[in-house]
């Protein structure tokens, strides 16, 4: 491996083992990790977002991990904020002579910094939100798909997220393009390749484990701290379905079954995004996630 790299990127779908791999790689290269996850930025949202904080401790050493636990639940973090936060951390790590490793599954966040997207800080549009109020997720998705070049193609598994995506598209329609604020970054991109069968097995096993670890209590605690059901549902996946169960909209079995299906669908969408990155010119070096971790690290660090 060349040590003149500006950045290594480790990407993959949920439950692919990317965090363990990135942490082990950071240990080997004396590097630091920058998280690219749209929900792990929130404090007190640990089990449901899969922070797997124990994975950042390798052979007794704590691997520095940035952009985790940086804002409060209820805030609306977005790709614009991520891009700016990333560059602050990226510059700091490079200034200290270390190698940054960008690791995550939020494809839009990853692509925004690698390509140097020009992004605008999009304000809320109350009139548009009111006009979309009452539409279901399928109707909102259809509206979103009507835009020719979406700027916000990301997870829209709740109406709130879909409305926000439409709001962004409407704003971009009325704005003149401006100069690029950040330049693209050359990065070695490593993708965790996991078979559909193994991915499904790991997702199902991990969901069961997280519920046993107290994920339901985590969501209860967030609600008791003043985070509204609507705000939690906005975050999608685990927080959406567990909240629907806690407010009496779903039985435990309905919650479990629907959430499991939703996570499988989400992982599939993540892979669709990564394959799309390849079509858009990114070279992703896929490695077999089923390979023992020490062998993976040796194969990556010994290659030229």
Image (tube, grey):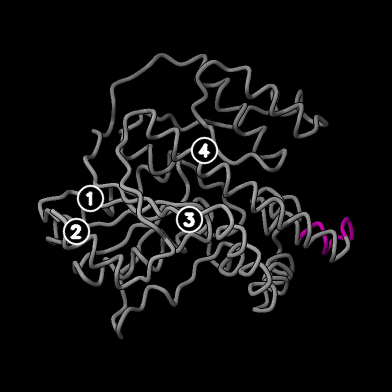
The front one of 1 and 149 is: 1
Q: In which quarter of the image is residue 255?
A: bottom right
- Could you tell me which residue is drawn at 54 percent across and 21 percent down? 171
Q: Magenta includes 248?
A: yes
Q: Do the residues labelled 1 and 4 touch (CB within 8 Å)?
A: no
Residue beneath disc 2 = 99
- Per the image, label 1 sits on a secondary structure element best described as loop
Q: Residues within 10 Å of mark 1 (few under 14, many from 20)?
A: many
**Of label 4 and label 3, which has the lower sequence position?**
3
> Considering the numbered disc 4 on the image, is that residue within a helix, a strand or a loop?
helix
Q: For label 3, count other residues whose C-alpha is less than 10 Å away and answer few (under 14), some (14-19) or many (20+).
A: many
Write the start and end of the magenta stretch as one range: 243-250
Q: Mark 3 touching mark 1, by CB under 8 A?
A: no
Is 93 situated left or right of 78 in this image?
left
Q: Earlier in the sequence, mark 3 or mark 1?
A: 1
Q: In which quarter of the image is the N terminus?
A: bottom left
**Front position among marks 2 and 3:** 3
Give the distance between the C-alpha atoms of the residues marked 4 and 2, in whole angstroms: 28 Å
Decide: marks 2, 3 in contact (CB < 8 A)? no
Among the two numbered marks 4 and 2 on one chain, the one whose residue lies closer to the N terminus: 2
Residue underneath mark 3: 194
The residues bearing labels 4 and 3 have C-alpha atoms spaced at a distance of: 14 Å
State whether residue 251 is above or below residue 12. below
Residue 47's disc is none
Which mark identifies residue 7?
1
Asked whether 99 or 128 is in front, the reply is 99
Q: Tell how many labels.
A: 4
- Within 10 angstroms of label 2, few (less than 14), some, or many (20 or more) residues? many
Quick one: label 1 or label 4, which is nearer the N terminus? 1
Residue 120 is left or right of residue 196, and the answer is left
Determine which of the numbered discs, if any, sits on residue 272 in the image. Answer: 4
Distance of label 2 from label 1 (alpha carbons):
6 Å
């Amino acid at each position: 491996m060349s040590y003149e790299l500006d950045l290594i990127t480790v990407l993959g779908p949920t439950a692919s083992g990317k965090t363990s791999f990135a942490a082990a790689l950071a240990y080997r290269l004396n590097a630091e990790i920058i998280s690219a996850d749209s929900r792990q930025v929130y404090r007190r949202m640990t089990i449901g977002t899969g922070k797997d904080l124990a994975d950042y401790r390798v052979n007794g050493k704590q691997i520095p991990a940035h952009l985790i636990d940086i804002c409060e639940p209820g805030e609306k973090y977005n790709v614009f904020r991520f891009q700016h936060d990333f560059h602050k951390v990226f510059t700091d790590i490079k200034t200290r002579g270390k190698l940054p490793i960008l690791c995550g599954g939020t494809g839009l966040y990853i692509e925004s910094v690698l390509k140097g997207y020009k992004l605008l800080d999009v304000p809320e549009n109350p009139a548009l939100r009111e006009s979309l109020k009452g539409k279901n997720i399928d109707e909102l998705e259809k509206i979103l798909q009507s835009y020719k070049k979406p700027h916000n193609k990301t997870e829209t598994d709740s109406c709130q997220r879909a409305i926000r995506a439409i709001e962004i598209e409407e704003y971009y329609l009325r704005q003149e393009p401006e100069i690029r604020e950040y330049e693209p970054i050359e990065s070695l991109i490593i993708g965790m390749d996991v078979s559909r069968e193994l991915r499904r097995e790991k997702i199902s096993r991990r969901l069961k484990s997280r519920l046993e670890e107290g994920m339901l209590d985590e969501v209860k605690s967030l609600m008791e701290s003043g985070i509204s059901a609507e705000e939690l549902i906005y975050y999608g996946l685990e927080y959406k379905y567990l909240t629907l169960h806690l407010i009496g909209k779903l039985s435990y079995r309905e919650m479990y079954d629907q959430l499991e299906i939703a996570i499988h669908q989400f992982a599939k969408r993540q892979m669709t995004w990564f394959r799309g990155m390849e079509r858009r010119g990114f070279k992703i070096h896929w490695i077999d996630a089923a390979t023992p971790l020490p062998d993976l690290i040796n194969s990556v660090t010994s290659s030229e």
